[in-house]
Amino acid sequence: MNMNELINVWVALPVLAFLISLVLPSKNENILSQFTFLSVGLHMLSLQAFLVYWLFHGHPTLDQKDWVLFTSAEYQFFIDFCFDKITAVYAFVGSFLTFLVTIYSRYYLHREPGYKRFFNTILFFYMGYNIAIFAGNMETLFVGWEILGISSFLLIAFYRERFLPVKNAVKVYSIYRIGDIGLILAMWMSHHLFHENITFLKLSNYEMVSDQLQNHTMVGIFISLMILLTAAAKSAQLPFSAWLPRAMEGPTPSSAIFYGSLAVHLGVFLLMRTYPFWEHQYSVRVVIGVLGLATAFVATLTANVQSNIKSQIAYASIAQIGLMFIELSLGWGIIALLHFAGNAFLRTYQLLVSPSVVSYLIKEMFYKFEPNKNYIKKVSYKKFIYTFYILSVKEWNLNSMMYKLYWNPLKWLGKRVDFITMKHVLYFFVPAFLAGVLVRYFHIHMPESFAHYLPILFSFIGLVMVLKAFTERHKARMSWVLIMLNHCWVALAISYNEEFMFSETFFYLSGIFIAGGLGYYSLNRMKKIEDNIDLARFNGHVFKHPKQAILFLLCCLGLSGFPITTTFIGEDLVFSHIHSNQLFLAVFVSASFIIDGLAIVRIYSRVFLGPHVHSVYEMGYRSS
């Protein structure tokens, strides 16, 4: 087996470990914990041995194209893995820290009701992390990216009987959806720019990239800004910084590995991977540097006034990642890699010892406290300092800004379409959809000027459907049906846009109908059993119906385009049929995919997570 083929081993081992962990007995803590850290330890030791072998053989850049999952006349979706110095550093740090955290978690989570669920999710995260860092193209990276997003949601909402962990998990996932769409739009435009599914190895070809960007400068800037949007959302840079402290609602080990060390640095990884593309776009480099500088400044001040030790560490990590953005904008990739490794080890250590540090600080405060003698005499200077202090205490209003600019506008738009009911859907929208299908597939003639606007119109109707689904306050089943209809309208819009073959439409919608049908069955069953599955509050039905909750979670993943159904490839396929000059169509479709993910997670969390709707079950309504 040559070195290229060995890449598959490092990706396959975490996948195999996760699948085996699902069938291990939940009542035996020793088997669960020992299997987890033995499997991660085996992966770490074998990877380190390979790193020594790779270094002694000249540390070549390896690339392995494995599986072609879908091929059409103008499009090919394939899985590609690569290995270079960036992957080597991220793999070494990731394997070592995951091994350390699994050993720590064995004792930290002793006798927790969700003991098995935690270790399953950690292995799920580790699987996604390795797919992401070994990815050789954006499509493969997106597979790992999606796994990291859903594992993040599950880890934050680990204490699923409490209010705040579930609420914050939904908030964090909503920010991740913005990053997902940034990555999808970057892939969409790069397909049109290079006319192929470009790999990171080809992207390092300066002559090829330069030739394309000379004639398509604005396209290059658009792709670079979408990559920056994705990196900023994943790495909690401005204006998305407020989500990271709220993600600390999960257990301390998951906070250490996810939000202190590994996942939060994947935005930096994405910028490193795509550096050859935006290296000579100096306007983009300036934007990256300014964003990193502003984030480092704001996060440093905010960290200094936090009363919660986890929040202090979170903002300190955000500030350091901001400095990494600056280093990358200056072209200091090696320094950024070393900075990542140092920051990851430090934040993991700080978070793992944070429970002990709290008790030490309390002791210091009561027994060794001395007032600060270095007070400031100048009144004007004091006002200046106090202004920054108040802004930092309020976290620079970043959370309220996200409400004003993101969540509140979505809710306002959703309320404008309150007229949509199931009766209206059956009497108006379904017949209109069927008429559109008949016109398209039976080639009924219509004026060319009218047909030109039909894709935009149909995609807008789909967006209206999913807006209503997101803001629906009561009927969970209706919201679920509207999400399915959104995908149908998107498929119809693209079929009018150009020759979107029936086989491609079927490929895309098959996953929607399978996941959607099973999900509707699950909601219908919960309605019959519990009667109350109202979306106005958290119902917490996972407490009594864990099997139904797992089934519905899988359906949610399938409907949102997670890589367990054909919908995942189908969404990328849809964007490959949107022309580079159809910005409105791309915006409507991408907005639909953002909001349908939010609506799906909202249905799952409202029906199954949070405090139980029946007060006879004693549970804390809110956490600290």
Image (cartoon, grey):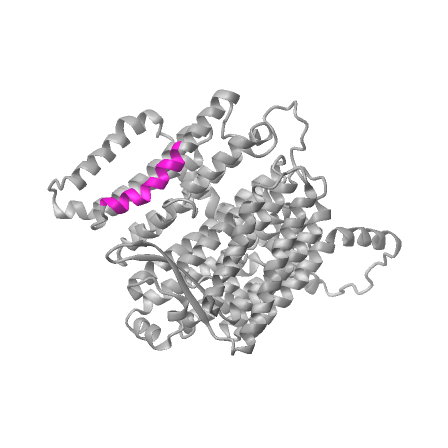
On the rendered structure, is 64 left or right of 499?
right
Question: Where does the image place residue 144, in percent across and percent down from the top left?
Answer: 48, 54
Queried whether the magenta region covers residue 505, the answer comes back as yes
Foreground of the two, 144 or 485: 144
**Residue 365 visible here:** yes
Q: Residue at x 37, y 66 (%)?
A: 221
On the rendered structure, is 255 left or right of 282?
right
Q: Residue furthest front?
A: 1
Residue stretch rendered in magenta on the structure:
502-517
Foreground of the two, 382 or 403: 403
On the rendered structure, is 265 left or right of 277?
right
Q: Main secondary structure of the magenta part?
A: helix
Question: Where does the image place residue 159, in percent across and percent down from the top left?
Answer: 63, 39
Queried whether the magenta region covers residue 29, the answer comes back as no
**Residue 456 visible here:** no
Question: Where does the image place residue 520, in percent across and percent down from the top left?
Answer: 41, 30
Image quadrant assignment for residue 73? bottom left
